Image (cartoon, rainbow, N blue to C red):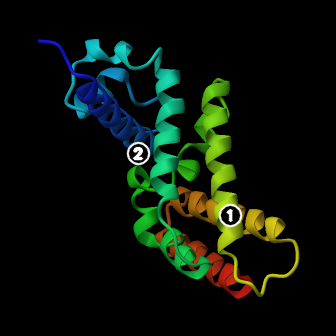
Amino acid sequence: MRVTQEQMRENRRRILAEASRLFREKGFEAVGVAEVMKAAGLTHGGFYGHFASKEDLMAHAIEHAAAEKAGSGGSVPDFLKSYLSPAHRDDPAGGCPMAALAADVRLRPEAARSAMTAGIRSQIARMEAALPDTVTGCRRREAIGTYAAMLGALILARAVEEPSLSDEILGETRRWLDHDA
């Protein structure tokens, strides 16, 4: 039975959605192609009809996740509240691909790093546009600093084993950034 172009696009979308979720949840090295394909409800054999390699899949999965996250708008305080929350911390599989995959990407080929770079550039531009009009200094510097602090806080909050310290990192960073925004 021949697969239609529409079904091919849908299969690719499912593969990307599952790969981005699994890579964020478990890390690139811990996830195999077979696991991604099974999660997408497809056979392992169909993988190479969509991607040249697992590395190629990672680059496209980052693009997919970054585009998915770019759609959520709002003010900087609303974004801070959502991003620096226990719910976001506790859901790496559904959360920010940059925070979940930055350490993995630095060791990957150029395509994955390029996809990460594009996602980061997009988030910085989004942050810059969302800054309140009261920010009259260098808006780009403010956006980069805010985004970097948010990412760093989320990574640290996920890394510590002590729940109270994790909550404190999120809360204090949110209050510090909210004061500046």
Identity, as a three-letter code, of the amino acid under mark 2:
Glu
| Tags 2 and 1 touching, CB below 8 Å | no
On the rendered structure, is 131 left or right of 104?
right
Quarter of the image holding residue 91?
bottom left
Q: Nearer the viewer, mark 2 or mark 1?
A: 1
55 vs 50, nearest the viewer? 50
Quadrant in the picture for residue 23 = top left
Quadrant of the rendering where the N terminus is positioned: top left
Q: Residue at x 61, y 37 (%)?
A: 115
Residue 91 vertical position relative to residue 49 in the rendered view, above or below: below
Is tag 2's residue or tag 1's residue first in the polypeptide sequence? 2
Say the numbered circle drawn on residue 147.
1
Q: Marks 2 and 1, how far apart in space?
A: 21 Å
> Residue drawn at (62%, 41%), measured in percent from left and top?
116
Q: Residue furthest left?
A: 1
Total marks drawn? 2
Q: In the rendering, at what x and y percent does residue 110 appear?
A: 68, 26
Q: Return the mark for residue 177.
A: none
The furthest residue to the front: 5
**For the residue carrying disc 1, how many other residues have a C-alpha within 10 Å: few (<14), some (14-19), or many (20+)?**
many
List x then y, in percent, for residue 179.
70, 87
On-image quarter of the C terminus: bottom right
* Residue 20, x across and y down, in percent: 42, 40
Relative side of 130 to 44, left or right: right
Q: Secondary structure at mark 1?
A: helix
Please give the name of the residue rendered at 35% of the width and 14% of the height, measured from the top-left corner. Answer: 49
Residue 48: percent from the left, percent from the top? Answer: 37, 13
Q: Which residue is tagged 2?
A: 25
Task: Residue type at mark 1: give it.
Answer: Tyr
> Mark 2, residues whose alpha carbon is within 10 Å: few (<14), some, or many (≥20)?
some
Q: Which residue does the image show at 79% across and 71% down from the upper left?
A: 142
Q: Is residue 135 left or right of residue 86?
A: right
